[in-house]
Amino acid sequence: MTTSANTEKNLSVVRGIPLSEEEGIGALTLGGYLKEVTDCFGPREAAVLPGDNGTESWSYDDLWARSMDVACALLAAGISKGTRVGILMTNRLEFLSSAFGTALAGGVATTFSTFSTPAELEVVLASSGCTVLLLERHVLKKDFAAILSELEPEINKASPGQLISKKFPFLRTVALVDSDETSGAIEGWNEFLARGKRISPELVEATAATVAPSDPGVLFFSSGSTGKPKGILSAHRGVCLQLWRWRQWLGLDKDVRSLTTNGFFWSGNFAMGIGGTFSVGGTLVLQPTFQPDEALSIMEAQRVSYIFAWPHQWAQLVDAKNWLDVDLSALKYIDASSPLSNHPTVSSDWIDATHAYGNTETFTLSSVFPANTPKAVSADSHGKPVAGNIFKIMDPLTGEIVPLGERGEIAVKGPTLMLGYIGIPNDEVLDEDGFFHTGDGGFFDEEGRLHWEGRLNDIIKTGGANVSPVEIDTVIAQCPGVKITKTVGIPDELLGELVVACIVPLEGVELTEATVRSFAKEQLASFKVPRRILFFAEDELEYTGSAKVKSTQLQTLASKRLESEAN
C-alpha cells in the first residue's frame, strides 16, 4: 500500500498504488463473493447466533443455501435487476441471507437502521423506493410492523402479496423475518420463502450471472450528526473490493471468531464484520443488540478472538457487573489502547488498524495503515491512500489545491467511491474532476500520510486561531476517569467561540474541571486547552445511528448549562 506524492509541484495530491497492482482481490459481485468463500470454506462455521432458546449456527454451505432460498422468493415476488429490497433487521443470520439473496436475485440490498424513529423510517422508506421490505418485527421495545401500519394504514387492508400503498408506491411485498404469522398484507417468513418453491436454482444462477461489478449493489443511508440521512448507492465492485481488503487490513486468520455488536446496516460493520471474517473463512458471532453483560458472556462462551465495537462500548464492557468474572483469554486481536486489553485474562501485543480514514461514500476506508503497522510508521496519521485512490487537499474557499503540508478540505476519488446520492445529480456532488469533497479538514505530510482533523464545520475558531476538536478529544480521552469526551465551540463575544469539553465520567469516578484542564495542558498548546469542562450523564447525550454524539444537540445542551451558571 505504498503511495507517492506529487512532489514535482509540491501540491497536496497523493495517490495509492494502481488498482492493477493490488493483490488478494477475488470476485467483484456480492453473489460471486459469497460463491467464492463458500467454495473455499463450505463446511466451516460461518455465523452463529447465541440465544435464550439455544444457539443457531450456519456453515458457509448453509448460508449459500439460505441465500438461494431468499433469492428464489424474491424472484417469485417479481423483483428484477436493480430492484431495491429493504432490509430492516438487527444482527441476525437472516440479515446475511437477505443481503446475499438480494444480490443473487439481481436486486439492490437496501439497509435500514433499527434505531430509526417512525419519522426517520418514513423518510428512508419513501426515498429508497423499495419494492420488497424484509423486516424484523420486534426489536427491543419497537414493533416495526405496527409502526409500518401506522405510517401507512392501508397496508393491512390488502390481501397477502397484493400490497398497494400510496405513501410508498413502489412497495409490493412485506415479510416478517422473526414470525411465521401473516397479518393482512404482511407475510410470515415461511410463507414468503414458500413463494420461491416454483423458482429453480438454475434461474437464480442465470440471474446472478447477469450482474456486473459496475451495477448497483447496495444502498446505505448516512447517519451524520446533523441533517436528514442521505441514500448512498454503491456498486458491487466497490463493496466487494472492501470486503476482500478488510482481511488484509485486519490480518485475522481462518480461526478467528469475530463478535459484532453493531448493526450491519452501517457500512463499517458490514464491511469489517463480513469482509474481515468471511474473507478468511472465520466465524461471525452475532449479538442482535448491544447488551454489555450479555456480550461478555457471549465472548467467553464462544471463545471470541476479535470484537467489532465502538470505543464507548468498550467502556460499557469494563463497567459491566460480570467484567471480572469472565474468561476472555481467547481475545487474541485486541489493541493495547483498548480498555479490554487490561482484563486480567487478556494478553495481546496486536496493533489494530485504527490509523485510517473513510466515509460511507467510499464504503469505508480510503486510507489506512494495516494492523500491526509500527507506531513509528503510522505516527499520529490516518493512513496512506488505498490502491486506486487519489486524494487532494483543497482550499475550501478558492477550490485550489493547497501546497503539501497545508490544511484544507479532503477530496477523494477511487474505485470504491459511491455511484451517487439517490435523488441528487452527481454534478452537484462531485467536482469537475470527479472528486468527492468530504467536508472534512486535514493535510498530507511529506511521507504521504493523511492527517484528518475533523469536520470543517466543527473546527472551532477561538481568539483568531483554528482549533480541531478531534485533537483535543484525543488527548482528553486518555485522562483517567473519562468515559466519553466531545469538544464543541460555544459562541463567545470576546473570543468568537469558547472551547468547551463535554465529558461523561466513568461510573464511580469523580472528576473535576481543574483535573481535566491540568491533564490537557500537559499535551496541548494553551489556546487549545478547553476554557470550560462540563460534565454530563451519558443519558443526557443523543447519538446518531453510528454512535456519534450529535454535535448540534450537545452545543445546545452546553450553551444552556453555561447560561444557567451565568444566571
Image (cartoon, rainbow, N blue to C red):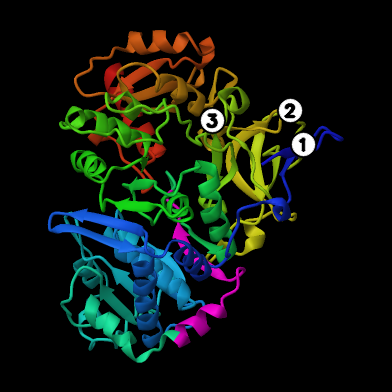
Q: Nearer the viewer, mark 3 or mark 2?
A: 2
Judge by depth and name the residue closer to the eye, 411 or 202.
202
**Discs 3, 1 touching: Cβ within 8 Å:** no
Quarter of the figure with the C terminus: top left
When the figure is inspected, residue 311 is found, relative to residue 272, above or below; the finding is above
The residue drawn where x is 25% and y is 50% is 289
Measuring 28% from the left and 42% from the top, which residue is drawn there? 303
Crowdedness near tag 2: few (<14), some (14–19) or many (≥20) residues, C-alpha within 10 Å: some
**Amino acid identity at mark 3:** Ile
Residue lying farthest to the left in this orientation:
53
Q: How dense is the environment of label 3, judged by Cα within 10 Å: few (below 14), some, or many (20 and up)? A: some
Please tell me in which quadrant of the rendered image residue 453 appears: top right
Residue 278 seen by the camera: yes
Magenta span has 277?
no
Q: Secondary structure at mark 2?
A: loop
Residue occupied by mark 1:
5
Answer yes or no: do the residues labelled 1 and 2 have beta carbons within 8 Å?
yes
Q: CA distance from mark 3 to mark 2?
A: 24 Å
Tell me residue 529's x, y (percent).
47, 14
Q: Does residue 347 appear to the left or right of 239 in the view shown?
A: left
Q: CA distance from mark 3 to mark 1?
A: 26 Å
Numbered circle sitting on residue 491: none
Whether residues under marks 3 and 2 lie with C-beta atoms below 8 angstroms apart, the answer is no
Task: Of the two numbered discs 3 and 2 on the same chain, state the one appearing first in sequence.
Answer: 2
| Mark 1 → mark 2, Cα distance in angstroms | 8 Å
The residue indicated by pointer 3 is 459
Which residue is rendered at x = 60% and y = 68% of the image?
A: 213
Disc 3, SS: loop
